[in-house]
């Protein structure tokens, strides 16, 4: 088994690569280290990956001249396509980034894989956002998903459709994973749980949209990684799966837990719901249970504790932290 991961220095790519490497699997990957959020965090993840013997190449997924020869040389068996421009609100400010990475980049990668004419499983990151303005909860894979609420969601839905067309023509086995609000140590600083922790810690106000009763199906990173690892055993031809927690939490609950763990009170500024945001996400996980044996184990309280422990170590060390020690102390894998 040989693995290639795009977006390997991103939050989910990093944890996936480490988990696979710990299983003795040869892991390669690429990342363009863009500045959507602090690239220093991506470099810190890269340093840990290199220390674990994971091969990280700095390259954009649209750069076929670099990736083509690389793919020919590595001859991987499984491809995990996690690189994308993430974030719902950024897609209103900077739509071209989503066209470049999530559409153009996605097709370029698929073209290269189709050209290899090898037996490769292609696993790609989709998102709970494909459920869009769907009102039926919990969200099931069989629900109609043709009403996205943002350009980001539309590109993720497009990925599922484009992947199917390449599967149909080139017979590439494909798996789409609809991730639900993934959180945890080494997480993404653009996401609410991280931004709220940072602002409350620094005594800055936090914006809460609506009355704070919006809910998200927060899913701990180790549970997500267990679902990703399960795809290594799949034999199905084309499928999509929810990887969620099946237990949505409100923004108000999130804020109270962070306040409690940090021992500091949040200064909340209530703002109207931004266009593009949905009221709830809630995964039905029956299909993932049956096929991937996916049973998320980490409670929101426990997962948030693990995140905050890591956050305090990473951001509050006066000496530069030994990254590997920090990784090991904050990982429950
Ligand atoms: N984290 C979540 O809650 C969540 C939820 C649903 C879906 N997803 C999807 O899962 C995947 C991984 O998300 P993440 O949370 O790890 O995000 P992330 O931003 O931390 O990771 C993505 C990585 O891809 C890299 N990248 C972006 N565009 C690239 C390009 N053109 N070429 C090469 N590298 C590029 C980035 O530098 C980044 O390191 C993404 O596809 C995202 O849309 C994430």
Image: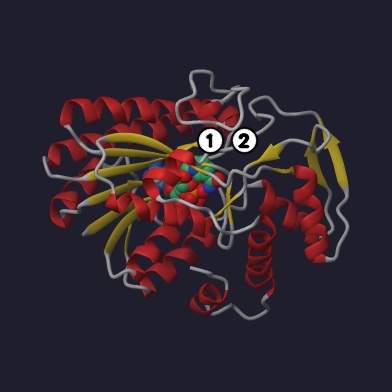
Q: How many marks?
A: 2
Residue marked by disc 2: 281
Residue 177 seen in the current view? yes
Q: Vertical placement of 150 versus 213: above or below?
A: above
Badge 1: residue crowd in 10 Å (few <14, some 14–19, many ≥20): many
Question: Please, what secondary structure does the residue beneath circle 1 have?
Answer: helix
Q: Residue at x 68, y 24 (%)?
A: 275
Q: Position of residue 204 (x, y in %)?
A: 83, 53
Q: Residue at x 85, y 37 (%)?
A: 270
Residue marked by disc 1: 128
Residue 10 seen in the current view? no
In the image, taking residue 256 as reference, residue 22 lies left or right, namely left
For ligand 1, tell me if the residue under mark 1 lies within 8 Å: yes
Q: Position of residue 177 (x, y in %)?
A: 42, 41
In the image, taking residue 160 as reference, residue 122 lies left or right, namely left
Q: What coloring was used for the rendering?
A: secondary structure
Cβ atoms under marks 2 and 1 closer than 8 Å: yes
Q: Position of residue 268 (x, y in %)?
A: 86, 45
Q: Quadrant of the N terminus?
A: bottom left
Q: Earlier in the sequence, mark 2 or mark 1?
A: 1
Which disc number belongs to residue 246? none
Question: Please, what secondary structure does the residue beneath circle 2 have?
Answer: loop
Q: Residue at x 66, y 42 (%)?
A: 248
Q: Determine the image quadrant of residue 139.
A: top right
Badge 2: residue crowd in 10 Å (few <14, some 14–19, many ≥20): many
């Amino acid at each position: 088994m040989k693995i290639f991961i795009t977006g390997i220095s991103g939050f989910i790519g990093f944890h996936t690569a480490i988990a696979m490497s710990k299983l003795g699997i040869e892991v390669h990957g690429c990342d363009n280290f863009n500045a959507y959020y602090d690239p220093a965090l991506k470099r810190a993840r890269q340093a840990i990956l290199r220390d674990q013997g994971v091969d990280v190449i700095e390259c954009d997924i649209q750069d076929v001249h670099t990736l083509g020869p690389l793919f020919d040389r590595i001859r991987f068996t499984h491809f995990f396509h996690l690189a994308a421009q993430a974030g719902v609100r950024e897609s209103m400010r900077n739509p071209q980034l989503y066209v470049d990475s999530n559409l153009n980049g996605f097709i370029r990668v698929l073209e290269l894989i189709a050209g290899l004419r090898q037996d490769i499983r292609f696993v790609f990151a989709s998102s709970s956002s494909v459920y869009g303005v769907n009102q039926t909860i919990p969200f099931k894979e069989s629900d109609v998903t043709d009403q996205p609420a943002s350009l980001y969601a539309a590109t993720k839905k497009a990925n599922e459709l484009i992947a199917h067309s390449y599967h149909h023509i080139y017979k590439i086995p494909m798996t789409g994973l609809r991730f639900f609000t993934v959180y945890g140590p080494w997480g993404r600083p653009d996401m609410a749980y991280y931004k709220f922790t940072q602002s409350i810690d620094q005594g800055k106000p936090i914006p809460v949209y609506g009355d704070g009763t919006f809910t998200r199906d927060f899913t701990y990173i180790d549970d997500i990684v267990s679902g990703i690892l399960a795809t290594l055993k799949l034999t199905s031809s084309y499928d999509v799966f929810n990887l969620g927690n099946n237990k949505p939490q409100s923004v108000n609950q999130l804020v109270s837990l962070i306040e409690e763990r940090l021992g500091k009170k949040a200064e909340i500024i209530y703002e109207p719901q931004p266009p593009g945001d949905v009221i709830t996400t809630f995964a039905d996980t029956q299909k993932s249970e049956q096929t991937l044996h996916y049973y998320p184990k980490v409670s929101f309280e426990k997962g948030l504790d693990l995140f905050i422990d890591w956050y305090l170590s990473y951001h509050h060390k006066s000496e530069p932290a030994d990254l590997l020690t920090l990784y090991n102390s904050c990982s429950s894998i």
